[in-house]
Image (cartoon, rainbow, N blue to C red):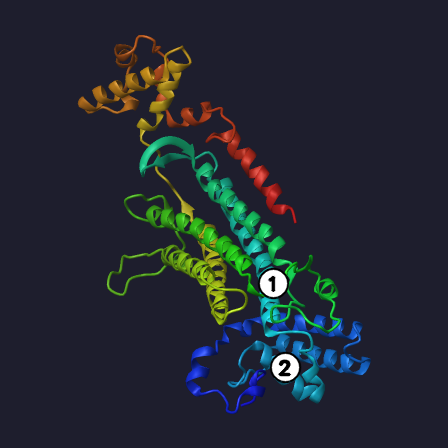
């Protein structure tokens, strides 16, 4: 089998070499490889490195291949070493010897780097759209929750009363930051490496600026060695995916807890849960569990990408072939998890129980603070109150004015009303805090952000 690099070799590659070195994961870059080649041909024609007839033939052939790809009828052969050789092989079938000029002034090093950049630019837009849809699902769930008050947790212990909507909106805010990360990485992705060649550029009069312009990228590389060796933009994209997966995993963990009989906060649609082969009563939140598991694998892929780069001398090394499998796995995990978790949240019937009255303990302490009591003294006073009530088998909701006055005379007869969790939320005034006004402001703000292009 003849290879792009086979000229100085006296025999073809052994099957062992072939099996070990060929990775078909780059076949998903077919559309990007064709787009890059079309721009390269246009640049070569403009630079006088192709005559008009050659440029027209190559362009026509590449456009025909693009149509085959769009219709899903492009055929990869087992002997195609990668997507680049597959396109060049098919181009030769369509236009003949002129296909051999496609690689003029180009290397697979800058070609592969370009294809992955173009692909990640496209998928970044898709993930941004998926994150926005997920965030809107969380906003919708928050609106549906209305003024339901639940315990907010620290250390998985009930801590303060919060609107359930405020809890749900925290995940919408996380998703908005994930959107910002994907938008931010675009600046580093939208740089054309085309023209860097193998590592040092070309003696031919190629025009990398024109290539970047034709590809509608923001500009070209500054240093040709960096252009083919760099993968930090891939790692940055991978981090954006991984962080979004970690956020989804945190919600997934809560969904698993909420669906238990012990918590009883949520019921998910039968269509989005599974049963047990042995226990007829089971209803399992598999979407949430698998999202949690895939987040773990995502962290592994990100770690692999970082480790892949750490010991490489300049410039291109074959190790970098492994970047695609890792980032594609990450991207696929996020795409699937976003779709599934958005559906799960949309199907949920939330019915959380009210919080324990002890979540209003801070409100009692702050009432004393407003009367000039140092916070630490107020904290201890309420602690003594809780201890005394617990010794008698009573809750904070059962505290009488006399109980409060006994631990600190600066408590007032009306203070037991502060032990109502709904009143606790209603009285909260700090900006962005867990109160009803804040929830309304957040919903409006997030809807405006998510509606913006």
Depth-wise, is mark 2 or mark 1 nearer the camera? 1
Q: Is residue 395 above or below residue 440?
A: above
In the rendered structure, find residue 83 and report the number of the disc placed on it.
none
Q: Residue furthest left?
A: 391
Circle 2 packing at 10 Å, graded few (<14), some (14-19), many (20+), is: many
Foreground residue among 124 and 427? 124
**Does the rendering let one see residue 74?**
no
Q: Is residue 157 above or below residue 203?
A: above
In the rendered structure, find residue 88 and report the number of the disc placed on it.
2
Count of marks overlaid on the render: 2
Check contact, mark 2 vs mark 1: CB within 8 A. Answer: no
CA distance separating discs 2 and 1: 23 Å
Residue 212 place in picture, x, y as percent: 70, 63
The part of the image, by quadrant, that contains residue 198 is bottom right
Q: Is residue 165 above or below residue 376?
A: below
Foreground residue among 115 and 408? 115
N-term mark: 2 or 1 = 2
Identified at 59% across, 50% down, the residue is: 184
Residue 69 place in picture, x, y as percent: 62, 76
Residue 113 place in picture, x, y as percent: 59, 67
Indicate the secondary structure of the residue bearing disc 2. helix
In the picture of the structure, the residue carrying the numbered disc 1 is: 227
Q: Residue furthest right?
A: 52
Q: Is residue 46 above or below residue 421?
A: below
Q: Please indicate whether residue 345 sits to the left or right of residue 157 in the image.
A: right
**Does the rendering let one see residue 427?**
yes
The part of the image, by quadrant, that contains residue 115 is bottom right
Circle 1 packing at 10 Å, graded few (<14), some (14-19), many (20+), is: many
Foreground residue among 203 and 279? 203
Q: Please indicate whether residue 54 sits to the left or right of residue 422 in the image.
A: right
Q: Please indicate whether residue 99 sits to the left or right of residue 285 in the image.
A: right
Indicate the secondary structure of the residue bearing disc 1. helix
């Amino acid at each position: 089998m003849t290879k792009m690099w086979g000229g100085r070799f006296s025999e073809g590659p052994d099957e062992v070499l072939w099996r070990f070195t060929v990775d078909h994961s780059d076949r998903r870059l077919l559309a990007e490889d064709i787009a890059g080649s079309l721009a390269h041909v246009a640049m070569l024609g403009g630079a006088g490195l192709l005559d008009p007839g050659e440029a027209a033939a190559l362009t026509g052939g590449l456009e025909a291949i693009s149509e085959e790809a769009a219709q899903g009828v492009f055929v990869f052969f087992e002997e195609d070493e990668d997507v680049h050789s597959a396109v060049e092989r098919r181009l030769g079938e369509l236009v003949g010897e002129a296909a051999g000029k496609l690689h003029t002034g180009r290397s697979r090093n800058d070609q592969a780097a370009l294809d992955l950049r173009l692909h990640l630019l496209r998928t970044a837009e898709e993930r941004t759209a998926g994150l926005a849809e997920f965030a809107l699902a969380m906003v919708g769930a928050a609106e549906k929750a209305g003024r339901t008050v639940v315990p907010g947790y620290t250390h998985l212990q009930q801590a303060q009363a919060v609107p359930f909507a405020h809890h749900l909106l925290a995940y919408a805010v996380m998703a908005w930051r994930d959107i910002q990360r994907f938008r931010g990485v675009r600046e580093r992705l939208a740089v054309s490496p085309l023209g860097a060649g193998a590592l040092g550029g070309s003696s031919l009069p190629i025009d990398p600026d024109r290539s970047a312009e034709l590809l509608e990228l923001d500009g070209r590389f500054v240093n040709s060695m960096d252009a083919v060796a760099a993968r930090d933009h891939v790692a940055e994209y991978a981090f954006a995916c991984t962080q979004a997966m970690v956020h989804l995993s945190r919600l997934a963990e809560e969904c698993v807890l909420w669906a238990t009989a012990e918590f009883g906060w949520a019921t998910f649609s039968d269509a989005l849960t599974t049963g047990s082969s042995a226990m007829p009563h089971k209803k399992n939140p598999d979407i949430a569990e698998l999202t949690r598991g895939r987040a773990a694998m995502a962290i592994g892929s990100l770690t692999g990408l970082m480790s892949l780069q750490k010991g490489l001398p300049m410039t291109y090394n074959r190790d970098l072939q492994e970047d695609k499998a890792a980032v594609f796995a990450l991207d696929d995990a996020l795409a699937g998890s976003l779709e599934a978790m958005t559906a799960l949240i949309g199907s949920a019937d939330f019915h959380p129980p009210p919080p324990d009255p002890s979540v209003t303990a801070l409100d009692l302490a702050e009432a004393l603070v407003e009367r000039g009591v140092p916070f630490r003294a107020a904290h201890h006073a309420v602690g003594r109150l809780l201890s005394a009530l617990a010794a008698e088998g009573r809750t904070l909701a059962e505290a009488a004015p006399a109980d409060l006055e006994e631990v600190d005379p600066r408590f007032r007869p009306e203070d037991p009303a502060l032990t109502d969790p709904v009143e606790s939320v209603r009285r909260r005034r700090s900006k962005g805090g867990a109160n009803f006004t804040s929830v309304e402001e957040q919903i409006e703000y997030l809807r405006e952000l998510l509606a913006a292009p």
